[in-house]
Image (cartoon, coloured by chain):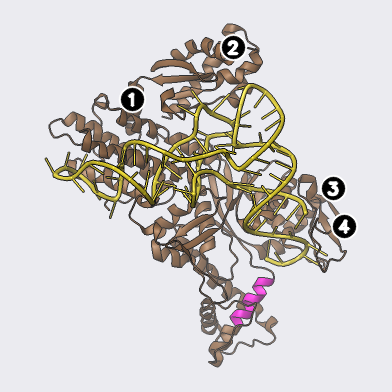
Chain colours: A brown, B yellow
RNA sequence: GGACGCGUAGCUCAGCUGGAUAGAGCAACUGCCUUCUAAGCAGUAGGUCAGAGGUUCGAAUCCUCUCGCGUUCACCA
């Protein structure tokens, strides 16, 4: 029951009829690409508005006003149309009879489980990789945003019919793992020798590695020969990684996040995928031994010419070609990442999404180039960048320093404000804009705090049902025509916008739109609530059961929609404040 | 210096991928509790959409340049 889709289909039919009736020669497909049917910004201009006349005027060589005048009659045949008019530069505005909205409401309530079902994904696979934090320590505040964003996006895409894989790439190879092993060994020795140790600069000082030391003692006793470290490297590595990955997964679980797939970088390196990408690149002539120019503009001090194996990523719009092998002959991080993306392409057989932190912006174009080359341009990859989160306490920045060990972990944040608050607030801003997270404000019980505001609206819905002694579940709308007040109709119209919001959020990969929708829905509802004070349109009218029933039904529709939105964000609704 | 992103009301931000008179919230001022939660609502005021060109029926949105802020910049991960 997507009312916009319903009328859009009518509009398409009308356009075709218009064309054949008047023997025009424009190409319908081209017009449909640009055709819109939207609620006008200002409701004075009616319920829906189309740009048809304006986009046709060039092809027909007629003014858009004249086209609009001629087209109006086709629209007035649509079911439920009350009035059609032409305004502004050539908008055709439609106003519906109130009945259309009332029928929508009763329809929506009858199909409350699936009225907003959208089949955008049509079961297609999509892989979304997010978090992928280095397995060297607990998740911190900075990871929270990418985690919530990625997870909400995954949930959103699932909702609209995609088969979604939530994936975490574990960077368990390379230098940082060496450091991790060194750090863990220090903690092990600390425990065995019972002498406290200073963690040198460059290694990981966090207390959590003491647990790893303990785990090593439990598993191997105090007789581990740690010199030379090669002898125990694998053992320590595996105990450290196990511990840290369990810690990370635990933190994610507290945020309501469960990944489907964890892929190990180490396994990618040891597998056959790297030779695979070489084959593909060779067959496309995208690989060569060469020397890179120094980056434009900078003058690196230790610049030296180096012949390396290079990928011609510049063919696909990257600013420079990229090294696949280091001068010592080992693979670069980018090469293994390319192999990893080939792995994702092979497994997914569908589009990819990467969620990255803002510090990786420079990396995007080479990954895009890689995916295009490796998939023969058949797979699209969308990289979403999450900007910084500024942690504040009542407006003042919280100072963090990794060295002093007082950085705020994800787990700290969740413990302080709860999972639902973290999830909501992280989505109250576009992902590519930096976001303030103020520990005081997000817990405030006031309108300034959007989480509260939305939850309060839902609690109020529930409060009305409590007072009415009617159970929300058992309520069946009897006579929608009893809803007559413009404010009631306005609320219904806004609910009718929900599937459209879902659709736009999903297509643009922008879960924040759901938050904004819920805030606005709450606002309209709070407003109607207060009308009970001065206009005497209370929801519960003691001596008019039918009217009460109709109004309660509207409240139910609001509650259903709020809950639906929250459920996509994986947030629990609150029933009583 | 190059690349990418951002610049919208005093502050914090939306703006449905090119539409009509650019919208919210805070802060400021004015009102609304004998009545379903005032933890809320209604109203007033507030704008050169950083600036300058261009593209077209139409630009905050697309293109070019300038200014400002941020991130990033050969073998790291």
Check contact, mark 2 vs mark 4: CB within 8 A: no
| Quadrant of the frame with the N terminus of chain A | top left
- Could you tell me which secondary element the residue under label 1 belongs to? helix
Label drawn at residue A75: none
Q: How many marks?
A: 4
Check contact, mark 1 vs mark 3: CB within 8 A: no
What's the chain of the residue with tag 2?
A: A
| C-alpha span from label 2 to label 4 | 59 Å
Mark 2 on the same chain as mark 3: yes
What's the chain of the residue with tag 3?
A: A
x, y percent for residue A275:
77, 57
**Camera-side mark, 1 or 3:** 1
Q: Is residue B69 left or right of residue A145?
A: right
Query: Where is mark 3, residue-wise?
Result: A285
Residue count near mark 2 (Cα–Cα under 10 Å), binned few <14, some 14–19, many ≥20: some
Residue beneath the point at 71% across and 55% down: A338
Query: Where is mark 1, residue-wise?
Result: A103
Residue beneath the point at 48% across and 48% down: A155
| C-alpha span from label 1 to label 3 | 61 Å
Label drawn at residue A19: 2
Residue count near mark 1 (Cα–Cα under 10 Å), binned few <14, some 14–19, many ≥20: few
- Could you tell me which secondary element the residue under label 2 belongs to? helix
**Camera-side mark, 2 or 3:** 2
């Amino acid at each position: 029951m997507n009312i916009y889709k319903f009328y859009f289909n009518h509009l398409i039919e009308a356009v075709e009829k218009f064309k054949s009736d008047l023997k025009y020669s424009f190409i319908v497909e081209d017009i449909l690409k640009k055709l819109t049917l939207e609620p006008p910004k200002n409701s004075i201009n009616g319920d829906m508005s189309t740009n048809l006349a304006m986009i046709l005027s060039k092809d027909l060589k007629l003014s858009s006003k004249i086209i609009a005048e001629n087209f109006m009659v086709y629209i007035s045949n649509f079911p439920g149309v009350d009035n059609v008019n032409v305004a502004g530069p050539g908008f055709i505005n439609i106003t519906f009879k109130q009945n259309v909205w009332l029928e929508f409401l009763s329809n929506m309530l009858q199909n409350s489980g699936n009225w907003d079902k959208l089949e955008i994904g049509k079961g297609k696979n999509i892989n979304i990789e997010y978090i992928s934090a280095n397995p060297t320590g607990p998740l911190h505040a900075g990871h929270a945003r990418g985690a919530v964003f990625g997870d909400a996006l995954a949930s959103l895409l699932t909702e609209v019919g995609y088969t979604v894989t939530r994936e975490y790439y574990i960077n368990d190879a390379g230098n940082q793992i060496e450091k991790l092993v060194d750090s863990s060994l220090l903690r092990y020795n600390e425990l065995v020798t019972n002498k406290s140790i200073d963690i040198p600069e460059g290694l990981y000082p966090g207390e959590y590695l003491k647990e790893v030391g303990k785990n090593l003692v439990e598993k191997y006793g105090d007789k581990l020969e740690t010199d030379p470290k090669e002898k125990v490297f694998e053992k320590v590595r595996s105990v450290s990684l196990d511990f840290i990955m369990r810690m990370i997964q635990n933190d994610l679980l507290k945020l309501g996040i469960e990944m489907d797939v964890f892929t190990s970088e180490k396994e990618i390196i040891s597998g056959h995928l790297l030779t695979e990408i070489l084959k593909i690149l060779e067959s496309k002539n995208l690989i060569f031994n060469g020397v890179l120019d120094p980056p434009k503009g900078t003058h690196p001090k230790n610049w030296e010419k180096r012949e390396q194996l290079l990928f011609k990523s510049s063919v696909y719009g990257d600013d420079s070609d990229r090294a696949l092998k280091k001068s010592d002959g080992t693979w670069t991080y980018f090469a293994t990442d390319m192999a990893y993306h080939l792995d994702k392409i092979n497994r997914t057989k569908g589009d990819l999404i990467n969620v990255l932190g803002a510090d990786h912006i420079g990396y995007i174009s080479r990954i895009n180039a890689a995916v295009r080359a490796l998939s023969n341009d058949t797979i699209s990859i969308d990289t979403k960048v999450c900007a910084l989160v500024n942690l504040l306490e009542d407006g003042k920045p919280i100072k963090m320093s990794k060295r002093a060990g007082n950085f705020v972990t994800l787990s700290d944040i969740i413990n302080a404000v709860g999972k639902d608050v973290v999830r909501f607030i992280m989505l109250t801003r576009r992902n590519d804009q930096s976001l303030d997270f103020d520990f005081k404000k997000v817990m405030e019980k006031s309108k300034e705090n959007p989480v509260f505001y939305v939850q309060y609206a839902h609690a109020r819905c529930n409060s009305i049902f409590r007072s009415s002694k009617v159970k929300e579940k058992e309520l069946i709308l009897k006579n929608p025509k009893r809803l007559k007040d413009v404010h009631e109709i306005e609320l219904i119209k806004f609910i009718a916008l929900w599937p459209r919001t879902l659709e736009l959020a999903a297509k643009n990969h922008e879960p924040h739109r759901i938050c904004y929708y819920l805030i606005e829905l709450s606002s309209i509802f709070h407003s109607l609530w207060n009308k009970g004070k001065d206009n005497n349109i209370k929801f519960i009218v003691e001596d008019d059961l039918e009217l009460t029933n109709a109004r309660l039904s509207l409240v139910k529709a609001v509650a259903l929609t709020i809950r639906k939105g929250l459920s996509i964000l994986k947030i629990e609704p609150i029933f009583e404040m």
